Image (tube, rainbow, N blue to C red):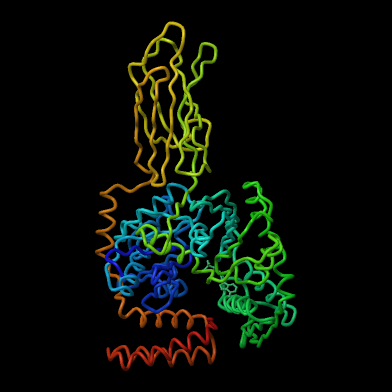
Amino acid sequence: MGERVVVGIDLGTTYSLVSVLRDDVPIVLPNALGEHLTPSAVSVDEQGVWLVGAAARARAVTHPLSTVLAFKRDMGTDRTYRLGGTTKSPVELSAMVLAELKRDAEAALGIPITEAVITVPAYFGDRQRQATRDAAEIAGLRADRIVNEPTAAALAYGLHRRDRDLRVCVLDLGGGTFDVTILSIADGIIEIHASAGDARLGGEDFTDAIVTWALEAITQRHGAAPRPDTREHARVREAAEHAKKILSREPTAGLALPGLALGRATVDVTLALDREQALRLWKPLLDRLRAPITRALRDASLLPSAIDEVLLVGGATRMRPVVELASSVFGKLPSHQLPPDEAVALGAAVQAALEQGHSAVEDVVVTDVAPFTLGVESSEISGNAVVGGLFVPVLERGTTIPASRVKRFFTLHPEQTQLNVRVFQGEHSLVRDNHFLGEYLLKGLPTRRAETTAVDVRLTYDLNGILEVEMSVVGSSRTEQLVIEQRPGKLGRAAVDEARRAMASLKIHPRSTLPNRTALERAEALFVQLTGPERDTLGVVLGHFRATLESQDPAVIEPARKELAALTAALARRE
Ligand code: AMP
């Protein structure tokens, strides 16, 4: 492997992954536990030691107040979280996840890693993209390139290497969101045409549908069912989640809930669910999946039959009815050969290889769309009054970038010698409701008795978020330029350095003992949920493992950890 290695990172809401191109094939790198998926979770313990990943995720059950999940949803906002006696922003929490992935990649590859390509949802605006870049910088990673998740999926499937133009629809059904993106690939250019989605529809809703059904069945049989926010309810949900995953592989699934406490009574519950029943439970959800697909196709002015490839991304596209729905809408079998939760990360590695000019990857230009409208302030004369502060869009949102657009503006009076060109970003008709980006005072305009002066304002926006404003005085050769590099929401140098210092001073759990710690936290999380003999058994094995930790001898610790991990997995019915 060469000197400089750029990794690909999928910084997800629930899970994150780091990947790299090895022997011309993208692979996901294992974390300290040897797992591919690192939960995007951060937790701090009573000793002030910070945990990232599976151990932190497990602590969401046992220590909800010192654990944060799903902070990606707040990227680009001013929200902060209090934990461990400090305040952390979503950028800092993301930086901790990125630092963990960097550590894992360095361990796997044996070299320092300082550059990454990071993926973001296609609908992320400038602010959220910049927040992602800032997080990378704090983690000690340069992220010159931010790539849209659906674009990465297309790269992972190697669609950029096909020798014909393609229209592609990427369906991404995660735990809590559904995103539909239509893109085209032609002459090595990947372009996003439309994106739509449902931010409140995901795999978790399919689990919830099974929970509702199970609670009804339990009520029918036993006259009562566990209430929400109780441990018994959590057990039902876990059994439902497990059954949902089984149905992706097998025609029927059982929900076994021995010793379920219902008030003072304890009952043994076993329920069976087959695919046909599940399909009935999921019908309303499956119907909801159709709407964003229809919207995206309409926005791209395409019929379903015009789509050449349908890609399935996100863990929940493993569900059969989702695959069947995609097949029936598009009249063709969707591609789901790659593990759906890894496709985006694999594509990020392909893009990373492109960044490095890797010979195995042909040149592909990936384009983006402008997330906001860019425009200029203007004034109108109305009778004797001048109405100012009006926003005139020049480069519309959704325009494929890099892009350049021009619009002509006029001075209000023939004798006017100056024109202040003020540039804004936003969608409102008045500039005061939009975001001010920069201004240029064009002086010494020619004055003419009869006419006002015309000025062409050209806005050019590139993939790195740099906006060039070019002003040409019509009828003269004069051209002035303003370059706006300051990105909205970007942390200044000082703020990034400060955040880096703050992170460097944190006690992060050592990587070498993370498997032990994770085994403990996972077992603890399960221990609080179990009851009866299962809890007793787990308690014994957990106690034994704690005792072996005292020995500090890996030869003693490891077999005990394996025993505990196996038991935890069996009891939690993890897959
Ligand atoms: P993601 O956010 O992409 O990790 O998606 C997670 C969602 O995928 C969760 O709702 C999981 O329950 C769901 N999921 C993962 N594996 C499977 C499977 N084998 N069958 C059905 N759903 C799954």
Image point 42% across, 19% down: which residue? 474
- Between residues 317 and 477, which one lies in front from this camera angle? 477
- Between residues 530 and 574, which one lies in front from this camera angle? 574
Horizontal side of residue 463 vs 496, given as left or right: right
- Between residues 8 and 567, which one lies in front from this camera angle? 8
Image point 44% across, 86% down: which residue? 565
- Is 384 situated above or below 362? above
Horizontal side of residue 286 vs 549, given as left or right: right
- Between residues 31 and 187, which one lies in front from this camera angle? 187
Horizontal side of residue 536 vs 309, given as left or right: left
How far from the left and from the top, in percent, is residue 72?
A: 45, 59
**Figure quarter occupied by ligand 1:** bottom right
Residue furthest top as drawn:
449
Image point 46% across, 66% down: which residue? 346
Q: How many labels does the image show?
A: 0
How far from the left and from the top, in percent, is residue 221?
A: 74, 82
Image point 72% across, 66% down: which residue? 283
How far from the left and from the top, in percent, is residue 259?
A: 61, 87
- Is 362 situated above or below 37? above
How far from the left and from the top, in percent, is residue 340?
A: 54, 69
Horizontal side of residue 284 vs 80, given as left or right: right
- Is 275 situated above or below 298? below
The quadrant of the image that shows the N terminus is bottom left
- Is 462 situated above or below 146? above
Residue furthest front as drawn:
163
